[in-house]
Image: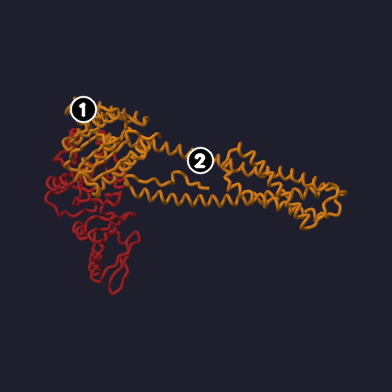
């Protein structure tokens, strides 16, 4: 019985952006196994309680019945105490048989079966258990204890009636047992479904959040305000570009992939807006192969955008002298290779401000990497490289023939 | 009032200029593009008010405040969107404006400054100006920062090149040596108790005799400071005055 929630599974961190995150997930896993062990113990206790309680209750019921309705004539030589003792034996045997049956049921994996395959198995199993019970019961009474059977009925009739009775009782026991497990499985399934839905929602929300960087948005609006007086035509153009970006990020949230061409247009809008802010500190070089432009390619929405935003943050915003971004796309074997390069040092400790801002891009890059893997399988990669010298390059490989998901 | 604009974006500075044009009593004496530039311009231009962007290339606006020699000019921060910074502002009671700046918010921020305006003018040529009790010291530790009035400081404690400040229920570290701090503090209000500690005399609550002619000074809030015999002598003289 492993109840480890899916969230506890440690996912390999492709980017290793936050090793702290991995440590945390491992801790969470320990907690999960701990809870699962505790749950296991609680269930074991519940079983012992039900098993013992149920049989003892049954025994008490029988004793009360005999005391109330005992037929004085058929009592024969058997005293009240003898009858009770024999009942206790029968009940104890039943308890033992069902207890061993449980071990086999678990071993055979019957707990994971549905109702339909269970019904014939329950009946068969009950028959076997009842036979064992009858043989054991009469065997002990006659062979070991040498008790006299009531002479009024032949032994075979007694045994048959005992067999039928026992089968009904064992069917009851098995039904209760499997009822509980089916119910529990249903509960667990529901819980898992809820958890899954929550994870999906969270991912969607995170994706939405990462799409329009509020810092960029408000800074752009501020520059725009200044630009209105200074250069009205350029301000008008900037409003259109900002509108394009906002519309794209709102719409693309619902799509799994978008044409690369569309994504490139949005990145152009974005860079034009950043150029208004950073002026000559931001220079951009596009290096997209003709074959890539001509091909009908799709990428996850905001993938290139995230990479470029990250490059602007580290290569331009945080450096006084600014620099040049290079955005390149070409085919490499059976994969599309996108590279975004910015000046900077991958290993340099970030300034407090950049570190603060950086934590959000770290998340952005990791999200992008996760999305890539979900959409295109394990062959799709996103890596950060410290090359060429003095620069940082985000390198994405998207297989052209992704495996069927 | 002399104003310096500190922002790495030309358009953002222009926008502020345009907004400030409505306030005739403000004179924009210069612009700076980052912390280094701002430090240089502040020492030359002696502005009384800074409009300070939080996010700039290199060091951020907070580190400018950390590196400025007190007393600090008045400061209004500007930021486009920065949850961290806004949290920090709430602690330090520093004023901030969100970009694009709402002209009404700007008026409100300036109104808050004006009553104090002439109270703490930066006299030209007084580089060794002592801090008055009303002046404020800027401290940052982790993601919190404070703009502490000097009179709230109970105790300053040397920790190598740093000084730990004790005020309210906080004790952040200031990136400045105790000796450097002592030079700036008013000797009428602050006393060097021993090699490591400077106390604010206004916070002294009780005095007890201590070993070999020394004194144990109790501060309001429960802290105790030991004085050597020599310092105790000075202290008695100071307190009897």
Mark 1 packing: few (<14 Cα in 10 Å), some, or many (20+)? many
Q: Where does label 2 land, which residue?
A: A191
Taking depth in this image into account, of B45 and A229 the one nearest to the observer is A229
**Residue B76 shows in this picture:** no
Q: Considering the image in quadrants, where does the C terminus of chain B appear?
A: bottom left
Whether marks 2 and 1 lie on the same chain: yes
Left or right, B148 with respect to A178, comes to left
Identify the element where label 2 is drawn.
helix
The image quarter in which residue A362 lies: top left
Left or right, B100 with respect to B222, comes to left
Q: Considering the image in quadrants, where does the N terminus of chain B appear?
A: top left
Going by the picture, which residue comes out furthest to the right?
A73
Camera-near label (2 vs 1) is 2
For marks 2 and 1, the one nearer the N-term is 2
The colour one sees for chain A in the rendered image is: orange
Residue B13 placement (x, y as % from top left): 18, 36
Question: Badge 1 sits on which subunit?
Answer: A
Taking depth in this image into account, of B31 and A235 the one nearest to the observer is A235
The colour one sees for chain B in the rendered image is: red
Question: Badge 2 sits on which subunit?
Answer: A
Taking depth in this image into account, of B128 and A145 the one nearest to the observer is A145
**Residue A29 shows in this picture:** yes
Mark 2 packing: few (<14 Cα in 10 Å), some, or many (20+)? few
Residue lying at 26% horizontally and 63% vertically, measured from the top left: B197
Identify the element where label 1 is drawn.
helix
The reply to whether the C-beta atoms of the residues labelled 2 and 1 are less than 8 Å apart is no
Q: Where does label 1 land, which residue?
A: A235
In the displayed structure, A355 sits above or below B182; it is: above
In the displayed structure, B161 sits above or below B68; it is: below
């Amino acid at each position: 019985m492993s109840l480890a929630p899916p969230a506890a599974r440690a996912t390999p961190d492709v980017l290793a952006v936050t090793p702290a995150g991995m440590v945390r997930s491992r801790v969470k896993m320990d907690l999960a196994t701990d809870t699962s062990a505790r749950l296991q113990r609680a269930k074991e206790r519940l079983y012992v309680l039900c098993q013992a309680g149920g049989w003892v209750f049954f025994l008490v019921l029988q004793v009360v019945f005999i005391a109330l309705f005992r037929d004085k004539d058929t009592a024969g030589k058997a005293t009240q105490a003898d009858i009770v003792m024999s009942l206790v034996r029968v009940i104890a045997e039943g308890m033992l048989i069902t207890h061993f049956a449980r071990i086999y049921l678990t071993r055979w994996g019957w707990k994971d079966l549905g109702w339909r395959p269970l019904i014939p198995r329950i009946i068969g199993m009950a028959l076997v258990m009842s036979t064992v019970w009858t043989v054991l019961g009469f065997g002990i009474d006659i062979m070991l204890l040498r008790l006299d059977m009531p002479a009024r009925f032949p032994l075979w009739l007694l045994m048959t009636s005992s067999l039928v009775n026992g089968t009904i009782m064992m069917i009851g026991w098995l039904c209760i047992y499997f009822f509980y497990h089916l119910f529990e499985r249903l509960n667990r399934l529901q819980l898992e479904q809820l958890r899954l839905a929550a994870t999906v929602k969270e991912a969607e929300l995170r994706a939405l959040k990462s799409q329009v960087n509020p810092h960029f948005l408000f800074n752009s609006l501020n520059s725009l305000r200044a630009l209105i007086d200074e250069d009205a035509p350029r301000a008008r153009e900037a409003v259109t570009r900002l509108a394009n970006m906002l519309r794209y990020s709102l719409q693309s949230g619902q799509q799994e992939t978008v044409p690369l061409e569309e994504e490139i247009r949005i990145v152009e809008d974005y860079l034009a807006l950043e150029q208004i802010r950073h002026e000559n500190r931001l220079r951009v070089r596009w290096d997209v192969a003709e074959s890539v432009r001509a091909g009908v390619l799709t990428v996850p929405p905001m993938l290139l955008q995230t990479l470029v935003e990250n490059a602007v943050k580290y290569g331009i915003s945080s450096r006084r002298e600014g620099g040049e971004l290079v955005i390149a796309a070409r085919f490499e074997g059976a994969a599309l290779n996108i590279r975004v390069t910015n000046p900077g040092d991958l290993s340099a400790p970030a300034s407090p401000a950049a570190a603060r801002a950086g934590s959000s891009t770290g998340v952005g890059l990791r999200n992008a990497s996760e999305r890539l893997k979900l959409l295109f399988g394990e062959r799709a990669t996103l890596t950060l490289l410290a090359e060429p010298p003095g620069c940082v390059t985000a390198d994405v490989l998207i297989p052209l023939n992704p495996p069927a998901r | 009032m002399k104003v310096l604009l500190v922002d790495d974006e030309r358009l953002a500075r222009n926008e502020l200029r345009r907004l400030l044009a409505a306030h005739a009593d403000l004179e924009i004496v210069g612009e700076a593009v980052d912390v280094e530039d701002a430090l240089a311009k502040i020492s030359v231009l002696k502005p009384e008010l800074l409009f300070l962007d939080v996010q700039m290339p290199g060091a951020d606006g907070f580190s400018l405040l950390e590196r400025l020699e007190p007393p600090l000019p008045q400061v209004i921060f500007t930021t486009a969107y920065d949850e961290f910074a806004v949290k920090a502002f709430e602690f330090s009671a520093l004023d901030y404006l969100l970009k694009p700046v709402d002209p009404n918010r700007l008026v409100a921020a300036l109104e808050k400054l004006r009553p104090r305006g002439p109270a703490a003018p930066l006299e030209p040529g007084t580089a060794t100006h002592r801090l008055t009790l009303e002046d404020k010291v800027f401290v940052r530790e982790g993601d919190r920062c404070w703009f502490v009035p000097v009179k709230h400081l109970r105790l300053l404690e040397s920790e190598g090149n740093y000084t730990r400040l004790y005020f309210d229920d906080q004790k952040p570290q200031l990136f400045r040596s105790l000796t450097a701090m002592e030079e700036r503090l008013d000797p009428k209000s602050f006393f060097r108790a021993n090699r490591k500690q400077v106390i604010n005399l206004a916070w002294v609550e009780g005095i007890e005799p201590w070993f070999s002619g020394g004194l144990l000074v109790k501060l309001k809030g429960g802290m105790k400071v030991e004085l050597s015999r020599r310092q105790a002598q000075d202290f008695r003289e100071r307190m009897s005055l």
